[in-house]
Image: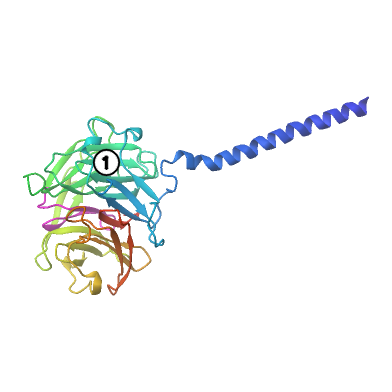
Amino acid sequence: MKTSNAKIMFFFCCSILFSACKKESGQQEADKEAPAKKQSNANATLATCCWIGTTNQANDRMEAYDPAVSSWTIPKWSFKPTTALGFNATSELPLWGDVNDVKVRNNNHWGSTQVIVAHGGRLSVIAKYPGGQRIWATGFPTDAGIHGIEILPDGNCVVAAAGTSAGTGGNYIRIYSSSQAAPNQYVNTIYPLTSAHQVLWDPSQNCLWAIGATLNKYAYNTAANGGTVSNPKLSLLMSYSLSTITPWGHDIATYDGDTNKLLVTTNGGVYVFSKSAGAFIPGAITGAAQRAFVNAVSTLPGQNIMVQTYKDPGCTFNGWCANHVDFYNLATGAFLYSRTVSTAAFYRGKSFDPNY
């Protein structure tokens, strides 16, 4: 009888143990699948470096592609504001369109390790990456002509407004207290800059760069300007003329491997700016990489590669788009390869680098 009871108890224990193991195994499999189910962009992961972040005006989406893949068919990540992501159907979504700038940044101010800052049409947004959930958004009048946007390390942001040929708006950069909780997240200050096209935070000099009719350098929240996180301020430190190169700036970017340099594009070409000299370096960009009307420039860190998107006459969607992104040797300017999406109308295609 004792032996029989012992056998029953043994099989009972084994049964419990087997059920527990099966449940744990099943939970582990569910846990493996959970991240993919939670992500609205199934292939997206936290950004390292570097995909290419593009602004596709043909479908009004931000899209990221892998430059190591020769055929760009399905993007690795994409974004467009929706009500499901928390954007307002009445006051925000109708303002979205003609996407023109996107950056991904390491930032945990809102409990997310990375965020994107983006602009399309008349709407600027900050959203969690990769999911795209709304953090902050603000709209602009039709003649603002926002072309560039940057998020600062503390969660505040800056936009560059070029204006439009049909209106008198724009021609400024504007800093917002986007880091703050509502209703204080829209405190802002405007600084004039004719045809402002792009802004870039520089951690090596703790300053903000902006380009338009001139290349400007600004201090952020210093004792001299009295700025605070809740009421952010800029101070113009220097304004550099573009007269030694060609007028009307389009884009600025870091220069891989040298924090003393900036890459700059204008209507007339691609250039390198020396921060210490306060001047453009003659002949720094040569070969096929030196061309006019480059809307976007960047580098792939550690690869000696420059990335460009330029106004391509072959793109008929509008007068400034391209359906491909081009890659060049950074040192020699020699053309390396292109990546094409035949249905796209890219305004910008840049290194999707989360680091400033």
Q: Nearer the viewer, residue 262 or 10?
A: 10
The residue positioned 49% from the left and 41% from the top of the image is 35
Q: On screen, 54 above or below 129?
A: below
Q: Work out whether residue 148 or residue 349 is closer to the camera in this orientation and state it.
A: 349
Residue in view at x 38 percent, y 65 percent: 302
Q: Position of residue 219 (x, y in %)?
A: 19, 51
Amino acid type of the residue that numbered disc 1 sits on in the rendered structure: Val
* Position of residue 69 measured from the top left corner of the image (x, y, whole percent): 41, 61
To which residue does mark 1 refer?
Answer: 125
Query: Magenta segment range?
Result: 192-216
The image shows residue 94, relative to residue 301, as above or below, that is above
In percent of width and height, residue 218 lies at: 18, 52
Q: Residues within 10 Å of mark 1 (few under 14, many from 20)?
A: many
Of all residues, the one furthest to the top in this rendering is 1
Say left or right for 296 vs 74. left
Relative vertical location of residue 166 with respect to residue 238 in this rendering, above or below = above
Magenta-span inclusion, residue 207: yes
Image quadrant in which the N terminus is located? top right
Residue 187 lies within the magenta run: no
Residue found 83% across the figure and 32% down from its top? 10
Q: Is any atom of residue 354 visible in this view?
A: no
Image coords of residue 141 (percent x, y): 13, 39
Which quadrant is home to the C terminus? bottom left
Residue visible at 23% across and 63% down in the picture: 263
Q: Nearer the viewer, residue 281 or 278?
A: 281
Left or right: residue 5 versus residue 161 is: right
